[in-house]
Image (cartoon, rainbow, N blue to C red):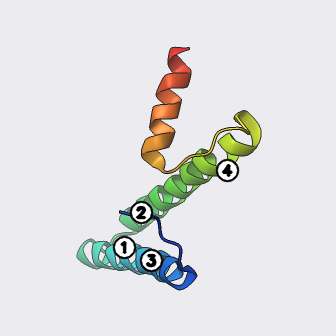
Amino acid sequence: MTDLKNPRVILAKGFLFLLLGGLAVVILIARVPRLDVAVLVAIAIWSFCRFYYFAFYVIQHYVDPGYRFAGLMDFARYAIRRRRK
């Protein structure tokens, strides 16, 4: 499989992820309409977004500027190798 190069397809993919996440949240809250569930969903979303930012921005700009990640699995391999050293 090749990398995506078409900007329109990349944007469409991003918005499909946003739609999918939003739909999952709406369905979950509709099935369990409680404030604690909504707060936990919001905390989970926020935490995962912050981790993604950490993995792809903070590491590359502040920890190891020479390393570029291709995805979260690549970041996991990097973190494991770095811990072993």
The Cα atoms of the two marked residues, 1 and 3, are separated by 18 Å
Q: Amino acid at mark 1?
A: Val
Q: Secondary structure at mark 3?
A: helix
Three-letter code, disc 4: Tyr
Q: CA distance from mark 4 to mark 2?
A: 24 Å
Q: Is residue 17 above or below residue 82?
A: below
Using the image, tell me which numbered label, if any, was put on residue 13.
Answer: 3
Q: How many marks?
A: 4
Instruction: Name the one closer to the observer, 9 or 21.
Output: 9
For marks 3 and 4, give the CA distance: 21 Å
Tell me where residue 24 appears, x and y as whole percent: 32, 73
Quarter of the rendering occupied by the C terminus:
top right
Q: Please name which of the two marks, 4 or 2, marks the residue nearer to the observer.
A: 4
In front: label 1 or label 3:
3
Query: What amino acid is found at the position of numbered circle 2 in the picture?
Result: Val
Label whose residue precedes the other's in the sequence (1 or 4): 1
- Upstream in the sequence, badge 1 or badge 3? 3
Is the Cβ of the residue at disc 1 closer than 8 Å to that at disc 2? yes
Residue at x 28%, y 79% (from the top left corner): 30
Please tell me in which quadrant of the rendered image residue 37 appears.
Answer: bottom left
Mark 3 neighbour density, 10 Å: few (under 14) some (14–19) many (20 or more):
few
Residue in view at x 62 percent, y 45 percent: 68
Q: Is residue 84 above or below residue 30?
A: above
Q: The residue tagged with tag 4: helix, strand or loop?
A: helix
Return the residue at label 2. Answer: 41
Label ID, residue 25? 1
Residue positioned most to the left: 31
